[in-house]
Amino acid sequence: MQVVFTKKEPPQWLLNMWQEIDDKTFGPGFDCFTEDAVCNLGVADWRGREAIRGNLKAFIDTGFTALHHITEYWDAGPLKVFRGVVDMTPDDASMKTVHPTMTHFFYMDERDATKVRHWVGAVGPVAFG
């Protein structure tokens, strides 16, 4: 398979999803996923839109606030690629904010190209020990 990527402005569905995470609301921004979507984020293997929503919420609730910044977005039709940086500010003021890089692949649904079927992403490292 061969695809051609075009650099574009990020679509609203992607902006909405990141905003839900940054605001810690985890609401309709996750409707960009099919009901049976799969997310492989780092070591995660979450299956289903509600599992993705719930597990991301649980992760964010471990004690930090995220702020996502988009560096670039590439569109190849059924495959979208996002690269950026996330500011991760701990709730504990004695800890410093970290700014790991991110790369995410969004494979769109074959039947409904407006929905994400599979999300593969990497963030980090989030700390150096």
Image (cartoon, grey):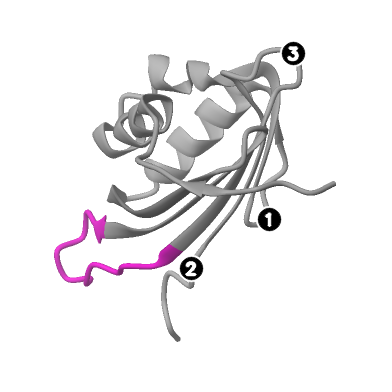
Q: Quadrant of residue 101?
A: bottom left
Rendered location of residue 122, percent (x, y): 57, 59
Residue 102 x, y percent position in the rendering: 46, 60
* Dot placed on the residue nearer the N-terminal end, 2 or 1: 1
Contact (CB < 8 A) between labels 2 and 1? Answer: no
Give the answer, above or below, for where 3 lies relative to 126.
above
The part of the image, by quadrant, that contains residue 25 is: top left
Residue type of the residue flagged with mark 2: Gly
Helix, strand or loop at mark 2: loop
- Which x, y percent locates residue 109? 70, 22
Residue 128 located left or right of residue 51 = left
Q: CA distance from mark 2 to mark 1?
A: 12 Å
Q: Is tag 1's residue or tag 3's residue first in the polypeptide sequence?
A: 1
Residue 22 is left or right of residue 106, and the answer is left
Q: Which residue is mark 2?
A: 124
Question: How many neighbours does mark 1 have within 10 angstroms: few (below 14), some (14-19), or many (20 or more)?
Answer: few
- Residue 43 bears which disc, if any? 1
Q: Badges 1 and 3: C-beta atoms under 8 Å apart?
A: no
Horizontal side, residue 94 vs residue 117: left or right: left
Q: Which of disc 3 and disc 2 is earlier in sequence? A: 3
User: Which numbered disc covers residue 111?
Assistant: 3
Residue at point 42%, 25% (across, down): 13
Residue nearest the observer in this picture, 1 or 45: 1
Q: Residue at x 74, y 13 (%)?
A: 111
Per the rendered image, the range of residues in magenta is 89-101
Task: Kindly report the secondary structure that dominates the magenta region of the rendered protein.
Answer: loop
Q: Residues within 10 Å of mark 3 (few under 14, many from 20)?
A: few
